[in-house]
Image: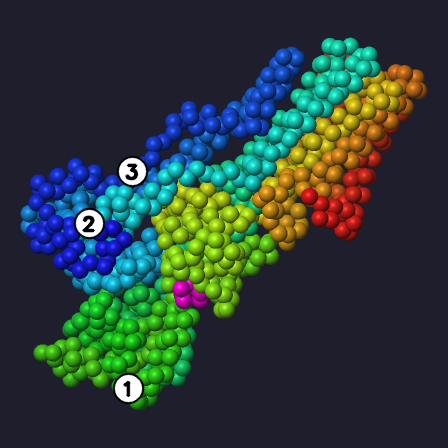
Amino acid sequence: MPASTQWHLLTPDKTLSALNSDGRRGLSREEAARRLVQTGPNALVEAARRSVLEILYHQFTDFMILVLLAAAVISGLIAEVYDSIAIIVIVILNAVIGAVQEYRAERAVAALRLLAAADARVVRDGKVFRCPASELVPGDLVQLEAGSLVPADLRLLEAVELQTNESALTGESLATGKACATLDDPELPLGDRTNLVYKGTQVARGRGVGVVVATGMDTEVGRIAGLLHGRSPLRTPLQQRLTRFGRHLSLAILAICALIFSVGLLQGEPVLLMLLTAISLAVAAIPEALPAVVTVSLALGARRLSRRNALVRQLPAVETMGSVTCICTDKTGTLTQNRMTLETLVVHEGRWPVARLGGQRDLLVRRLGQALALSNDVIMSEERPLGDPTELALYVAARDKGFDKAVLAHDWPRELELPFDADRKRMTTVHRERDHFVAFVKGAPEVLLPLASQVLTASGAVALDRERYEQEARRLAAEGYRVLALACRELPVLPESNVEQAVESALVLLGLVALIDPPREEVPAAVSDCRSAGIIPIMITGDHPETARAIAVRLGIATPEDEVLTGRDLQQLPDGVFAERVRDIRVYARVTPEQKIRIVTALQAQGAFVAMTGDGINDAPALKQASIGVAMGRTGTDVAREAADMVLLDDNFATIVAAVRDGRRIFDNIRKFIKYTMTSNSGEIWTLLLAPFLGLPVPLLPIHILWINLVTDGLPGLALSMEPAERNLMCRPPRPPDESIFAQGMWQHMLWVGLLIGALSLIGQAWAYYDDGSHWQTLVFTVLTFAQLFHVLAIRSERDSLISIGLFTNPALLGVVLMTVVLQLAVIYLPVLNAIFKTEPLSVTELGVCVGLASLVLVAVELEKWLYRRGWLYAGAS
């Protein structure tokens, strides 16, 4: 039996012979039952799903989570129960959120099952009856009618004005005309196989009969379901960076704690004290608030995006959008309105805008309006007109310019019709006009122009310059338009014989009409914003190459000189050659779902972080393969939505730009938290490490370390997640996906500012220790705490000064800083807390010294930013 991709090459008789079926009687019931056992039901098979427990267990395999669990155990062993409980709660919350997202993500294939028709009109033993579509087998004869879902992949045997809507499967915005004629190109794209109809598509017009050639997972929809199976989600840049960060941090902490323990012992400190100090420092150095900060940042970002009509299905997708370097977008319904529109007319005078039909009604305008309104099969229902998208576009254009079909049809009743089919490529309707008849003909220019001898002008008919209109038709087609010709002929009587010859000859051309699925109004600006943000937009569509090029040029995605790579061209390119060219291609046309995956994969192999947008079934595998999948909510299929990480509820491409902006802001804020907490930890480490070498006693007790960790890490870090976006956010290129989280001068900042905090703390300790020998431990404890609070205020922006961004633009952070100051003062001055924390009240002078030393951190970081703004610091730092 021939492969499913070759059915379009076989004649109807050979197809029936290959399937051992009868073109009139179909299969017998017994044979159908036997084949059903052999092939299985006509349904999509879902991959084995992981249980909820398996998904939950997977959440605890991340390295950073394991480090935090170890920290929780250590905290419990040293009697810091509250710290241990806090870590465990954070880890569990993180795991539950991740498990819920992963469980929802596994439902992508399930949505495909909803495309199955409930039943089908099938012919068996010569009788027509309805049977469940799941019981269809190869060789069954199936009858199709307007409005029905195609229940399986069929080779057509009969087609009467048959058109199917395949946009969700192929990306083609127009209904596809179908015929029975055998095709001869083995490499023909899916959308051009006009003698086949596919499971899950809808019959838009006409009727037909086809023989089932594929069912279940062997259908085109089934093939897409197979592509969705087994594709585990890619790790986001943030997840990759945090994993690397966790590994490096753990090793560094172990080494530093071992060093501090050894130095303390060499100085003669008690073994137990140094052991507890080293362990406390290890717990403090691990940023256990990081998962909470990340989760809260992403949750707040998701909430903000939901108010902008972007529904986040995978929480990490919020940050991931800020890392994209390429946006691969479908055309139909994503960049365009998925609605054919009459945009231009070509008449004897030249090109007319559609608005010209609403002007002075001379002879030509009247005839054009009448032809547009009457020569179609649009049904005028109470809610909205129904019909073929092309005819709807003509009808709407006429109606909006005052040519009402209902009124005209009453005065000009239809007396005769020669319907459109794939062979004639034209349609004719004949209407009574008082004592004579008028025929209106519309069709492909290459078919209709040879039938015309004159062209109508405002004052009457003149000789037709056929070559001029042929050139205009080619030019319009090259601009991405679908072009139809309109003509008319007046008849004294209705012909009784040889009707086609009598009506469709010696026509008077009215003009050419150019239709297009117009771009969304907001998309050009969104594309421009993407470019300014260093993001490359790429169109990947199943539509015709010239249409794709025209829309891409209009939107600014490509230039007229850019190459359009078709699916056929792509199929012939070896992987190595394609890998070299993929960065330069901006438009792909007539591509298959497998080829969309190949394009996304090739971009990812080149180091790109790829967002894929789409709305059709054919987009779902690429949505899942992409670094982040973005589906359309209004026009999108359930399949696309379930495969995506984010859904645009308003189908607005511009919403993607808002998501990119929020993603970048969130990543910036997570970086700020890491910069803040690791610098703070660095300050504590330098203080403990350097004190023995300066002849000073161990500056901090374990309880001091854990207190600083509790009050100055967690809450300020959470408040940093609410920091507004920096002003230059969308004017900088995306961060490379493999870039370290410590790039852009971050590790240098953590090193020198941490050293500064340690130095200031030790200066305070030395001053108090050598002055009168009292309060020195409380003083160094307070300097460390206040220094970190000044530091968190200073790093709210990587470039701008605190004065320029304003102290009150993040009220949550300001509130946390003031609350921490109050708590620290309580620890210093309340007797009950003095006993617990081993602190002593400081004098006004001593407190002033603490604040003065700590404030130098703010001054130093502001100086760093001043140098950075002038390009004198961290230029090219990584």
Dot 1, how many residues are within 10 Å of its Cα: few (below 14), some (14-19), or many (20+)? many
Quadrant of residue 405 within the rendered picture: bottom left
Q: What span is colored magenta in the figure? A: 545-550
Residue in the image at 22% along x and 84% along y: 506
C-alpha separation, residue under disc 3 versus residue under disc 2: 23 Å
Q: Amino acid at mark 2?
A: Met
Q: Decide if residue 103 is on the left or right side of residue 157.
A: right
Q: Earlier in the sequence, mark 3 or mark 2?
A: 2
Q: Amino acid at mark 3?
A: Val
Q: Amino acid at mark 1?
A: Gln
| Rendered location of residue 364, percent (x, y) | 32, 82
Residue 227 visible in the snapshot: yes
Dot 3, how many residues are within 10 Å of its Cα: few (below 14), some (14-19), or many (20+)? some
Residue tagged by mark 3?
45
Residue furthest out toward the left: 126
Residue in the image at 29% along x and 76% along y: 446
| Rendered location of residue 194, percent (x, y) | 25, 60
Above or below, 77 relative to 287? above
**Which is more toward the observer, 653 or 287?**
287
- Mark whose residue sits in front, 3 or 2: 2
| Rendered location of residue 779, percent (x, y) | 83, 22
Residue tagged by mark 1?
454
**Which is more toward the observer, 841 or 146?**
146
C-alpha separation, residue under disc 1 versus residue under disc 3: 59 Å
Residue in the image at 47% along x and 46% along y: 626
As helix, strand or loop, the secondary structure at mark 3 comes to loop
C-alpha separation, residue under disc 1 versus residue under disc 2: 53 Å
Q: Earlier in the sequence, mark 1 or mark 2?
A: 2
Residue tagged by mark 2?
1
Which secondary structure class fits the magenta region best? helix
Dot 2, how many residues are within 10 Å of its Cα: few (below 14), some (14-19), or many (20+)? few
